[in-house]
C-alpha cells in the first residue's frame, strides 16, 4: 500500500507543515579543503572516464556506476575506490561543517525562546555525527535523548519513551527513525544532514 504525502495531509494523517531550506557557508579552512577534494574528485573522475573508454566502457554515466566499478580488481577498480573515498571525505566535510552545527543550535534557541516546551526531532546522516550533536546539546543544557542503531534496544526504547513523555524535548537520531515514527507532539524536525534521497 502506498500513501502519498498529499493524500496523508488530506486525510489528516499528517499535520500541516512548512519546509525551510538554509544555505550555509563554509569556514575558510573548510572551503580550502572542499575545493581541494573537489579538484581531486574531478581529476580522478576524468581518469576513470578515459580508462573506461579504453576498456570499452562507453557509458556516459560511468561516474554513477562507481560502486560497481569499485569491485573490480584492476586499475579502474582502484580509481573507482579512490573516487568513492574522496567523495565520502567531501560529504563528511559538508555534513559536519561548523556552520551546520551552529545553525542547529540557533534554530533550536529561537524555537525554545518562542515556546519553551518546543519538541524537536533531529536527524543526522551518521552515528558519529549524531553523538557529536547529542553531546553539544547536552553541553548547552537541552533536555535531549539520542537514538541510533548501535545502541542497545533497551536504551533506544528508553530514549524514545523519554521523548514521547516530554522528559527529553529533543531527540537526535540517525536514519533509523526516518520512517514509521509517530510522535504527534513534535513541533519541529531538523534534517541536520541527509542524503539526496527524496
Image (tube, rainbow, N blue to C red):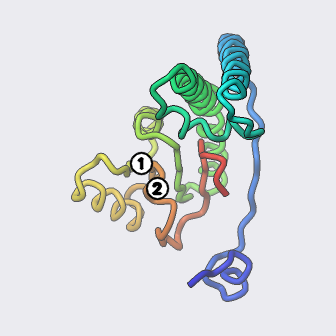
Residue 5 in which image quadrant: bottom right
Task: List x then y, in percent, for residue 176.
Answer: 43, 56
Task: List x then y, in percent, for residue 127.
Answer: 41, 40
Q: Please tell me how crowded label 2 is: few (under 14), some (14-19), or many (20+) other residues with Cα within 10 Å.
A: many
Residue 27 visible somewhere in the drawing: no
Say what secondary structure mark 2 lies in: loop
Furthest residue toward bottom: 11
On the rendered image, what quadrant is the N terminus found in? bottom right
Q: State yes or no: discs 2 and 1 in contact (Cβ < 8 Å).
A: yes
| Residues at marks 2 and 1, CA–CA distance in whole angstroms | 6 Å
The residue located at (38%, 67%) in the rendering is: 165
Question: 148 above or below 42?
Answer: below
Task: List x then y, in percent, for residue 153.
Answer: 24, 58
The one nearer the camera, 79 or 4, is: 79
Badge 2 is on which residue? 169
Task: List x then y, in percent, for residue 101.
Answer: 58, 33
The one nearer the camera, 157 or 76, is: 76
Residue 196 visible somewhere in the drawing: yes
The one nearer the camera, 144 or 82, is: 82
Q: How many labels, in total?
A: 2
The residue located at (67%, 40%) in the rendering is: 64
Q: Please tell me how crowded label 1 is: few (under 14), some (14-19), or many (20+) other residues with Cα within 10 Å.
A: many
The residue located at (71%, 16%) in the rendering is: 43
Left or right for 131, reference 184: left
Left or right for 180, reference 46: left
Say what secondary structure mark 1 lies in: strand
Question: 43 above or below 7?
Answer: above
The residue located at (40%, 55%) in the rendering is: 168
Badge 1 is on which residue? 144
The one nearer the camera, 59 or 117, is: 59
Question: 145 above or below 83?
Answer: below
Amino acid at each position: 500500500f502506498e500513501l502519498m504525502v498529499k493524500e496523508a495531509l488530506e486525510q489528516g494523517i499528517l499535520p500541516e507543515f512548512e519546509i525551510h531550506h538554509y544555505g550555509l557557508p563554509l569556514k575558510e579552512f573548510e572551503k580550502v579543503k572542499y575545493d581541494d577534494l573537489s579538484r581531486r574528485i574531478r581529476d580522478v573522475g576524468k581518469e576513470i572516464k578515459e580508462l573506461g573508454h579504453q576498456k570499452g566502457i562507453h557509458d556516459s554515466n560511468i561516474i554513477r556506476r562507481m560502486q560497481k566499478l569499485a569491485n573490480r580488481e584492476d586499475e579502474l577498480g582502484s580509481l573507482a575506490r579512490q573516487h568513492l573515498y574522496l567523495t565520502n571525505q567531501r560529504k563528511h566535510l559538508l555534513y559536519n561543517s561548523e556552520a551546520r552545527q551552529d545553525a542547529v543550535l540557533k534554530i533550536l534557541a529561537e524555537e525554545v525562546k518562542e515556546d519553551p516546551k518546543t519538541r524537536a526531532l533531529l536527524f543526522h546522516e551518521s552515528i558519529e555525527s549524531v553523538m557529536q550533536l547529542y553531546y553539544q546539546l547536552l553541553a548547552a543544557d537541552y533536555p535531549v535523548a539520542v537514538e541510533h542503531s548501535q545502541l542497545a534496544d533497551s536504551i533506544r526504547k528508553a530514549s524514545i519513551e523519554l521523548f514521547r513523555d516530554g522528559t527529553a524535548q529533543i531527540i537526535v537520531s540517525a536514519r533509523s527513525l526516518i520512517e514509521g515514527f509517530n510522535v504527534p507532539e513534535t513541533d519541529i524536525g531538523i534534517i541536520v544532514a541527509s542524503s539526496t534521497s527524496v
